């Protein structure tokens, strides 16, 4: 009986197993559950053609682990190879990939630390007597976060063991389409052969190659979450969500933080929403150097870093000193040492990412790829997990279901969170023409902000719909507290082809922020004031 | 006493009270509209301004005080995230209540302005029917005026019920009094098992007070009982005392004061056992009764349910008298929720004056109970789904989860829970959604919209989660074995 993600249980009237907690669930979700009971028996059936494994997964991150564990559910012989090349600053970590170690998890926890700082301020308005001053200690937070991440590393090791997936902590490279070899840390050569290979090595932060001192003196997100001491006065270079999220929480815990952006924030996201995010950050205390780019980083005698940059608007050169400079200028796929050329796996010449088709297949038979390494896919944990699981189900479970990359919701965890699903307004205009879309929008104030006397200027939402009769929803954008929680359910609605009238028929839950979505009625076209008033 | 009647005071619609939206809606269609709103003070003397229950003694102050309690927890968590401040943190009831009341005052004011801006006549007077198409409005000073209108909408809502035992009205409070109480309630006994009882008990405990809940039988009657019990368990683990299967039979004053000391005597529902306890405050939350008995409905022939006082209406909110309509908490067999009342009121007016035909959709209305561990729900409970469709025709998917934000502070690692109920015979249509966890309302709203769009399990499975948030767990839940209810 298949109990896969999306699979149906058998309905043949036979007695159900009494196992109330089948061992299949999303990687990240179940890491926060009690450990599931041991995997179904029958693993390790061996492969044909004398190869040691049915499936070898290179890369033990979100996509790789999900794929491996799913394949093991079908009783296949599976191995995972995971290796973390230390960052230029020397930072390394355990099994679990970017999300667990240097991405989503530590990011959200540090974001939470920053939010709690605001909560402390709010609490006083709500009657809590907290003596001033209030301090934040980086090392306490870092230790709490790092300990939790390590528990996840451990949890992953245990799960692989329970599912009888072989784990190699080695850096693999292809020697032929079915053979991967590498050296263990101790220098021992290991050769692994498999019928099917999935590449899921993800990406690593880029360094700007045209800035002197960037590599020697700067850190990236790979290092930030593992710092033992506070980064102090920090310059974050970049306009990605990584940059804004990190700068956001650093500001929130009380550090002097500056973001340097060459051009627009959150490229690829709805630009009106992106501006609201950065506007909020400015009022929150993050400094912005807009239309600036760094030219060099030097170390001062005080051990501080002196950064020199060009201001494109003023055509001037400026300089300032920081304790930490963090590069958040994009991520590059981790394919250098894989030896892809040897086996003929095609990559995109510009991005370096692996080209795959709708079934995650590369240009080489029996070699697949999932996750951040793949060209044209969202760089998100849940899509990697879903794609990895579905791939395993197609390879070993007689499924033909392909991953649906449409309408994938996401959230930017800036100090004021931004959640979205579907098309940005500009993408909708481009695709359908502005006459054919209707944008409903509203500025609202979360109830909890009222007593706390918090500014809600950037709390805003908009729904982009087709204008024709049915008014299908093309995109939903929400800035406010708990944006991810708000958007998730609506993403389901959009998957069901939700229309504007259906939203209006849905009764709101009161009092929440999300209910405002079901009450949207002012269009941009009308030009009317979109501020929500009263109850 | 002056009677005042003239043709000029003839209205197209006269609305006897509360939620502002419907009145403003009617005024949009250039109808002459009047609103009569009056708050009879509680036995303790509490009263409030325009806006009705939600604004003054319901949703709004409740959520704000719930937020105050959540912030207390946040303070504790923040230490683990590196924040440092003195060990001892105390809560000041007056600071909180003053802020809350100030905000409510601004809402009362906002409604007065909105009515004025939309040219709706507002009278702070008690309305009652005296004859066909005629209503008498009596203000605080006892001055009476008569008004006529083509149509009437009754929206008088409800007030908390009293026990009918010695000392209840003299010494006990209700939710009508709690949110404006000018002193800290202290050690509190909450009588009841409604969401009002549990939400109030929850935030009072969260603010550091000694709280006991006295429950006659089950918690949250009408809600999914497995979820209700989990809520109760969580509250118990977090310091709320529960006395189960007892009802108070008398309340006596031991000491006067703000607060004073009250002695409560209670009898077991299962036998003859009697218990006594002393509390600073006794809060009654045993139910609410519609304000329909004293508004002259008999004079115009409007039928009410004699037992409950609720008004039966058709699916267009029309009573048995063709020109009299009703919306909100007073309706029989409808949900007692602000958004439902607003929606019903708005759509009613559009049907009356704008030629619209859309009726209020009362199916799959989502709701949230703002207990310390919040509970969001939409659709069938597990037991009603089993009852309606048969156990073999429903599939339940569920999952516990641990919010990421609770990991570092190491708390409550297996308490949050999500459950999705599907109808196998209808393409595994999602017919029930239940989530217990932080921000349950924010999570549930979107799922309710999806359910309105006919969400099936397959569509759920095909939707990608947002990571890392609590809501994503709801699309990742796994199969619950049959035969195991609750």
Image (tube, rainbow, N blue to C red):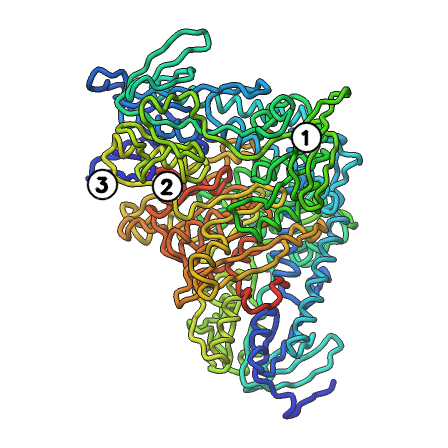
Q: Contact, CB < 8 Å: mark 3 with mark 1? A: no
| Residue highlighted by disc 3 | A11
Q: Contact, CB < 8 Å: mark 2 with mark 3? A: no
Q: Could you tell me which secondary element the residue under label 1 belongs to? A: helix
Q: Contact, CB < 8 Å: mark 2 with mark 1? A: no
Q: Which numbered dot is residue B397?
A: 2
Q: Residue furthest bottom?
A: B7
- The one nearer the camera, B340 or B228, is B340
10 Å crowding of disc 1: few (<14), some (14-19), many (20+): many
Q: Could you tell me which secondary element the residue under label 2 belongs to? A: strand
| Residue highlighted by disc 1 | B79
Whether residue B439 is visible here, answered yes or no, is yes
- The one nearer the camera, B92 or B71, is B71
Q: Could you tell me which secondary element the residue under label 3 belongs to? A: loop
Q: Which numbered dot is residue B105?
A: none
- The one nearer the camera, A43 or B126, is A43
Determine the CA span between mark 3 and mark 1.
51 Å
Question: Looking at the image, which residue is at 53% across and 21% down?
Answer: A150
Return the chain for callout 1: B
Where's the C terminus of chain B, which quadrant? Answer: top left
Which of the two discs, 2 and 1, labels the residue nearer the N terminus?
A: 1
Return the chain for callout 3: A
């Amino acid at each position: 009986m298949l109990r896969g993600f999306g699979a149906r249980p058998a309905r043949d009237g036979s007695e159900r197993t009494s196992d109330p907690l089948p061992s299949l669930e999303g990687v990240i979700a179940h890491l926060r559950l009690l450990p599931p009971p041991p995997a179904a028996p029958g693993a390790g059936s061996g492969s044909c053609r004398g190869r040691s494994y049915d499936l070898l997964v290179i890369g033990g991150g979100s996509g790789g682990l999900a794929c491996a564990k799913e394949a093991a559910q079908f009783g296949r012989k599976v191995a995972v190879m995971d290796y973390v090349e230390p960052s230029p600053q020397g930072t390394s970590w355990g099994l679990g990939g970017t999300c667990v170690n240097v991405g989503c998890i530590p990011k959200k926890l540090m974001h939470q630390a920053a939010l709690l700082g605001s909560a402390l301020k709010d609490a006083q308005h709500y009657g809590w007597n907290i003596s001033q001053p209030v301090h934040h200690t980086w090392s306490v937070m870092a230790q709490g976060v790092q300990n939790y991440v390590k528990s996840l590393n451990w949890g992953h090791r245990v799960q692989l063991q329970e599912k009888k997936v072989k784990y190699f902590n080695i850096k693999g490279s292809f020697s032929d389409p079915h053979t991967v070899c590498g050296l263990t840390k101790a220098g021992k050569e290991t050769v692994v052969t498999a019928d099917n290979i999935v590449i899921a090595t993800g990406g690593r932060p880029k360094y700007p190659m045209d800035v002197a001192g960037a590599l020697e003196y700067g850190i990236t997100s790979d290092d930030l979450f593992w710092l033992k001491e506070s980064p102090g006065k920090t310059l974050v270079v970049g306009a990605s969500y990584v940059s804004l999220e990190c700068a956001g929480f650093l500001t929130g815990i009380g550090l002097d933080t500056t973001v340097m952006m060459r051009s627009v924030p959150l490229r690829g996201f709805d630009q009106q929403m992106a501006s609201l995010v950065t506007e909020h950050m400015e009022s929150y205390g993050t400094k912005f150097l807009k239309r600036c780019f760094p030219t060099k980083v030097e170390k001062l005698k005080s051990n501080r870093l002196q950064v020199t940059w060009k201001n494109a608007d003023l055509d001037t050169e400026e300089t300032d000193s920081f304790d930490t400079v963090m590069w958040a200028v994009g991520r590059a796929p981790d394919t250098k040492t894989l030896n892809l050329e040897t086996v003929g796996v095609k990559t995109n010449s510009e991005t370096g990412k692996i080209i795959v088709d709708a079934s995650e297949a590369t240009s080489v038979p029996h070699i697949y790829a999932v996750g951040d390494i793949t060209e044209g896919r969202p760089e998100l944990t849940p899509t990697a997990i879903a794609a990895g699981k579905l791939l395993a189900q197609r390879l070993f479970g007689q499924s033909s279901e392909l991953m649906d990359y449409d309408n994938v919701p996401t959230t930017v965890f800036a100090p004021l969170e931004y959640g979205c699903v579907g098309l940005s307004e500009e993408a909708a205009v481009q695709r359908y023409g502005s006459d054919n879309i209707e944008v409903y929008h509203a500025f609202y104030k979360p109830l909890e902000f009222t007593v706390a006397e918090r500014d809600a200027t950037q709390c805003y939402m908009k729904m982009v719909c087709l204008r024709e009769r049915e008014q299908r929803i093309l995109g939903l954008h929400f800035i406010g507290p708990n944006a991810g929680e708000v958007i998730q359910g609506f993403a389901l609605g959009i998957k069901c082809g939700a229309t504007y009238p259906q939203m209006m028929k849905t009764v709101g839950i009161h009092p929440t922020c999300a209910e405002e979505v079901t009450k949207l009625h002012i269009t941009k076209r009308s030009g009317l004031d979109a501020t929500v008033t009263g109850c | 006493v002056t009677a005042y009647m003239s043709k000029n005071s003839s209205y197209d619609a006269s609305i006897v009270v509360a939620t502002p939206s419907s009145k403003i809606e009617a005024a949009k269609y250039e109808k002459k509209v009047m609103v009569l709103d009056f708050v009879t003070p509680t036995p303790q003397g509490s009263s409030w301004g325009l806006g009705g229950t939600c604004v003054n003694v319901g949703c709004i102050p409740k959520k704000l005080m719930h937020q105050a309690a959540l912030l207390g927890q946040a303070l504790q968590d923040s230490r683990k995230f590196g924040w440092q401040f003195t060990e001892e943190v105390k809560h000041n009831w007056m600071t909180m209540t003053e802020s809350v009341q100030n905000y409510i005052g601004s809402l009362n004011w906002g409604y007065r302005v909105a009515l004025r801006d939309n040219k709706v006549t507002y009278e702070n007077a008690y309305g009652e029917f005296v004859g066909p198409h005629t209503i008498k409005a009596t203000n605080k000073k006892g001055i009476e005026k008569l008004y006529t209108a083509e149509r009437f909408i009754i929206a008088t809502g409800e007030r908390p019920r009293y026990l009918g035992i010695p000392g209840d009205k003299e010494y006990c409070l209700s939710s009508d009094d709690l949110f404006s109480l000018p002193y800290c309630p202290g050690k509190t006994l909450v009588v009841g098992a409604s969401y009002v009882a549990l939400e109030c008990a929850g935030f009072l405990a969260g603010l550091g007070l000694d709280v006991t809940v006295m429950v006659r039988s089950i918690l949250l009657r009408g809600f999914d009982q497995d979820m209700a019990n989990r809520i109760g368990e969580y509250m118990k683990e977090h310091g709320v005392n529960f006395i189960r299967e007892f009802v108070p039979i008398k309340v006596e004053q031991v000491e006067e004061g703000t607060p004073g000391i009250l002695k409560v005597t209670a009898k077991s529902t299962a036998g003859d056992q009697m218990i006594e306890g002393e509390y600073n405050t006794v809060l009654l939350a045993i139910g609410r009764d519609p304000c329909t008995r004293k508004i002259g409905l008999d004079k115009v022939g409007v039928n009410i349910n004699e037992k409950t006082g609720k008004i039966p209406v058709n699916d267009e909110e029309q009573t048995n008298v063709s020109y009299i309509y009703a919306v909100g908490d007073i309706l029989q067999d409808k949900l007692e929720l602000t958004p439902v009342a607003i929606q019903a009121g708005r759509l009613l007016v559009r049907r009356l004056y704008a030629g619209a035909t859309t009726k209020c959709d009362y199916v799959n209305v989502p709701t949230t109970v703002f207990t310390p561990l919040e509970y969001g729900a939409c659709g069938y409970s597990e037991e009603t789904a089993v009852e309606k469709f048969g156990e073999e025709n429903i599939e339940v998917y569920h999952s516990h989860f641990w919010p990421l934000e609770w990991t570092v502070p190491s708390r409550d690692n297996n308490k949050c829970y999500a459950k999705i109920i599907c109808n196998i015979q209808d393409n595994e249509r999602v017919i029930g959604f239940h989530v217990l966890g932080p921000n349950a309302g924010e999570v549930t709203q979107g799922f309710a919209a999806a359910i309105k769009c006919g969400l099936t399990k397959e569509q759920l499975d095909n939707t990608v989660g947002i990571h890392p948030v609590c809501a994503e767990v709801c699309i990742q839940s796994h199969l619950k074995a049959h035969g195991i209810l609750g």
